[in-house]
Structure formats: structure tokens, C-alpha cells
Amino acid sequence: MSTSATTRLNDVDLEAVAGLAGKIQQQPGVADTSWSARVSWKGGFRSEAQIREFGPITSDEPAQLGGTDTGPNPVEQLLAALGNCLAVGYAANASAAGIEIRDLSIELEGELDLHTFLGLAPGGNAGYDNISVRVRIDCDAPAAALEALHDRVVGTSPVGHTLARAVPLKIELDHS
């Protein structure tokens, strides 16, 4: 395990994470957060998402779906969001457990039937029918510690939890 004077492991600032957890224990309302994004249509199937002060995130459809393939499509971005969330969970929880990660990769795949999206099966499921995830982690931790880490990450993933349960979704139309 390699740490520095700022108590970093796996490039995670352990003091910052512990400080936030301590603050939330003292003031539970601090845990209630709100996140947002703004998406602007750019023509065709192209759009850009603006999140905080970061540069725009481009979205498009592949050519076989009528797009110009200038960026990942929304369902690919959903898989990436889950993979990124899991990566954060592994880094945070491994670091808290004193496990040094040499390498971590997460492969995600989802099956989606385009019938409903294309209007060929009204009322059907336009979303993923299933999502499969394979996590590869290279570290010296014993198998039992890795299983506990995996269970903790899966059990605390905000994106994983969002995808695994019904979430109230309200989509309003504001037109001029």
C-alpha cells in the first residue's frame, strides 16, 4: 500500500472522503444533493450536454440509425455512466479498505430491441432488456476481501441503484 503525506491511496484523497462522511454524520441534511445537466439540440440526431463548467459532451447516433456518428449515443452514455460510477465505487471503497489497485477495467454491454424506439411496437420497452457488467481488478487483496469490496460497490452505486429500480420520472413540455 502506497500513501503520501496527504493520505492518498489509488489517487483518492482519503482525508477529503472521510471529512465528507464525518460532516454528513454530524449534519445529515448535507447528504441531500441535487445534480443537473442541460442538453441542447445541434441538428439531426446531434446534441450536447452541458454539466457544471465542463466542456460539452457530444451525443449522436451511429450512421446505421440515421445519425452522423460524431459521438456516443445516449444508451452508450448510460452504460458509460454506470461503468464510471462503479469505477468511483471501487476506487473509494478499495482505498478505504487499504487495498491498492494496480489496474481496474469495467466492460458493460446491454441488449436493446429497437422496435419500440422506431414506433414499430407501441407501448413496448424502448430501454435495455438487460445490462451485463464484467469487472476486472488487479490487486494483491485476498479473494474474500475482493468479494466484500465488490458487494459494497454494487450495494452503494448511485447509478446502479437508479437503473435497478423504478424511479419517478416527470417529463414536462414547455413550448412557445
Image (cartoon, rainbow, N blue to C red):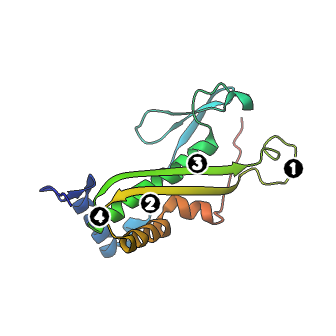
Badge 1 vs badge 2, beta-carbon distance below 8 Å: no
Task: Name which residue type carries label 4.
Answer: Ile
Helix, strand or loop at label 3? It is: helix
Name the residue that disc number 1 marks.
122
Q: Earlier in the sequence, mark 4 or mark 1?
A: 4
Q: In this rendering, which labeled residue sits more in front, label 2 or label 3?
A: 3
Residue type (three-letter) at the residue carrying disc 1: Pro
Label 2 or label 4, whichever lies nearer to me, is: 4
Q: Which residue is mark 3?
A: 78
Q: Is residue 11 left or right of residue 110?
A: left
Left or right of 93, for residue 82: right
Q: CA distance from mark 1 to mark 3?
A: 23 Å
Mark toward the start of the polypeptide (1 vs 2): 2
- Give the label on residue 33, or none: 2
Q: Earlier in the sequence, mark 2 or mark 4?
A: 2
Is the residue 68 above or below the residue 95 in the image? above
Choose between 40 and 122: the one closer to the eye: 122
Q: Secondary structure at mark 4?
A: loop
Numbered disc in front, either 1 or 3: 3
- Whether tag 2 and tag 4 are in contact, CB under 8 A, the answer is no
Q: Earlier in the sequence, mark 2 or mark 3?
A: 2
Mark-to-mark CA distance, 2 and 3: 20 Å
In the depicted view, which residue is nearer to us: 54 or 134? 134
Task: Say what secondary structure mark 1 lies in.
Answer: loop
Label disc, if present, on residue 99 of the rendered structure = 4
Question: Of circles 4 and 1, which is in front?
Answer: 4
| Tag 2 secondary structure | loop
Q: Is residue 60 above or below residue 141?
A: above
The amino acid type of the residue labelled 2 equals Thr
- The crowding category of the residue bearing disc 1, from other C-alpha atoms within 10 Å (few below 14, some 14 to 19, many at least 20), is few
Q: Residue at x 30, y 75 (%)?
A: 26
Which residue is painted at 55% across and 56% down in the image? 133
